Amino acid sequence: MKKKPRYLLWLIIGLTILALFINLPKLSNIHFANKTFNFDPNSIFAALKINKVLEFREGLDLKGGTSLILRANMKNIPSAQRNAALDSAKTVIANRVNLFGVSEPLVQTSVANNNDYRIIVEIPGITDVNQVKSLIGTTAQLTFWEEIASSSAKLGSPDIINVNGTYFKKTNLTGSDIQQTSVAFSQDKGLPEVQLTFTSAGTKKFADITQRIVGKRLAIVLDNQIIEAPSVNQAIVGGNAVIEGGFTTDTAGQLSTELNAGALPVPLSILSSSIIQPTLGSSSLAKSLFAGALGFIIIIIFMTVLYGRLGVIASAALTLYTLFVLGIFKLSSITPYGITLTLSGIAGFILSIGMAVDANILIFERMKEELRQGKPKATAIELGFSRAWTSIRDSNISTLITSSVLYGFGTGMVKGFALVLAIGVLVSMFSAVVVTRTFLRLIYK
């Protein structure tokens, strides 16, 4: 065997051991050779003093969660600005939901015929209703902080923050001093920018602040998070300000929405709250998993009967593919953007298994054609892979493009399906082309 295939074999063995370590559940009181062993994949995090847990993240339909319906009080908001105010409030709620570290939350708006403005929030995996209420059931707080010298900073004061060695002090300018914000384009360069218009009281406050911090930065803080910190080039006394910073149209619009969220006083009241039970009962979930396992076994039998030894090799590669994908799902739980498994995501995973088998079938049929032409087995293997690769590549790229479109324009479970399918397709390409080829080279040598 050549050196490169040997390195690939060791890579596959290493990935398999890692995947097994990640996927194995916690095992206690294992008796072997008169000794008792305990196994916990999370022990490595505990040893490193890292507060992370390897687990599968489950969506609302599998695990349940919390549902809140919020009503936005538009009494003091002009009619023309109510839809924008509702969208801004939705943005703030979505940002707060992200603090839970959950994936695929549902945050949507609803406007009834009687001008009843509502925000519907569904958070998977969180069952503490009071915790959710305290975090997302309040009005957005927009404040402005001026840069100060480090020597004048009173450390420990709640009105002083330190951002990468730069100190900011809270001012008396708040979101209530902003009349409105909008996206415009600069006259000299035509680049997107965000325009702020202050009230009469806000105009005076803003003028006083900008006069004393010329050449320094003014931090804009929404819900204790800095969303922008532009430099003040000159004193601004006219009540209108412009924030520049290499924005795109989308990022400028996002900043304008966040500023409006703190500028428009939209009180939110909780109409109802409830614990969502999994829409799939335990029996339904068990039946779904049984169906997936049965389909997997049938695929192995089909490949073995149809292709013999080649089918056994493909089945081994398919088993490793399943371990790798499940390992990625579980390993992603320690990141802020972990993959949440929903019923649609499981469907995408099962679909990618079929696509992995499809790639092996293309390769084996090409190998058969080469063997019928009298080529040696080693030559037939290499030609089968190289000539089937273009078809495998093109079909998988088209699937990845479709997944990207679904993820970019879809919401909720559609995004989950697209993400899981894309990961499955990428791993299936590695399984079919690298793992299967390495096994064939090893056996037929």
Image (cartoon, helix red, strand yellow):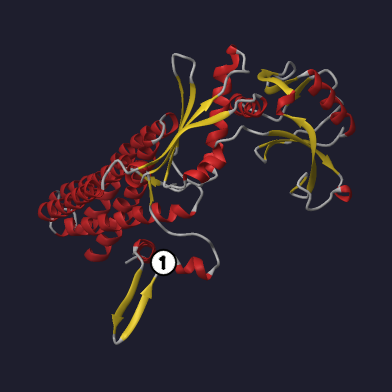
- Residue 269 in picture, x, y percent from top left: 54, 30
Locate residue 189 relative to residue 76 in the image: left or right.
right
Residue 327 seen anywhere in this rendered image of the structure: yes
**Residue 238: image location, x then y, percent:** 83, 17
Residue drawn 72% across the image and 34% down it:
143
View extreme (top): residue: 80
Answer above or below: position of 296 versus 273: below
The vertical placement of 111 against 44, above or below, is above
Q: Quadrant of residue 35?
A: bottom left
Asked if 384 appears above or below 192 in the picture, the reply is below
**Which residue was labeled with disc 1?**
41
Above or below, 317 against 27 in this view is: above
Which amino acid lies under the numbered mark 1 shown in the image of this protein?
Pro
Nearer the observer, 230 or 385: 230
- Give the residue displayed 62% in from the left and 17% down from the top: 77
Q: Is residue 140 left or right of residue 343?
A: right
Picture quarter with the C terminus: bottom left
Q: Secondary structure at mark 1?
A: loop
